[in-house]
Amino acid sequence: MTFDEFNTSVESDASPVENLSLPLQALWWDRRGDWHQAHEVSQQSNSQEGDRVHAYLHRKEGDEGNASYWYSRAGESKVATSLDEEWEMLVKRYLAKS
């Protein structure tokens, strides 16, 4: 799946494509405006990628302390980009791995 196809799916489908990883599903739900579903899915991932998306979600929520914890768990530093730029970077990164 390409980045453009992912975005089209967010706009047109009722749920994420089945073969998407849990971190990508979380990012899909986030883009749909369902932070709580995105958070739930990111917690189910039990992976470094899921932890990274979890960090992004808490940053978006405004909970900097919790975000810092999850960035650390994911082995990464907090980014200095906008939330939209971080979301796009994560989607492209995880699509490239799938």
Image: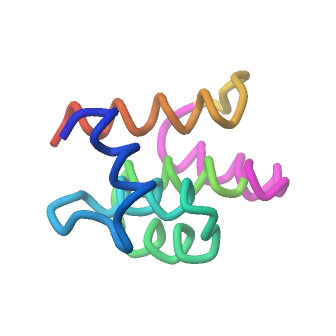
Q: Residue at x 23, y 63 (%)?
A: 17
Based on the picture, tell me whether residue 62 belongs to the magenta stretch: yes
For residue 15, above or below residue 54: below
Could you tell whether 63 is left or right of 19 in the image? right
Q: Quadrant of residue 6?
A: top left
Depicted 3 relative to depicted 17: above or below: above
Residue 96 located within the stretch drawn in magenta: no
Q: Is 36 on the left or on the right of 3, as rendered?
A: right
Q: Position of residue 38 (x, y in %)?
A: 53, 67
- Which of the 4 image quadrants contains residue 4? top left
Quadrant of residue 34 within the rendered picture: bottom right
Q: Name the one closer to the observer, 62 or 13.
A: 13
38 relative position to 16: left or right:
right
Is 67 situated above or below 86?
below
Q: Main secondary structure of the magenta part?
A: helix
Q: What is the magenta range?
A: 59-76
The structure residue drawn at horizontal position 64% and vertical position 67%, both measured from the top left corner, is 35
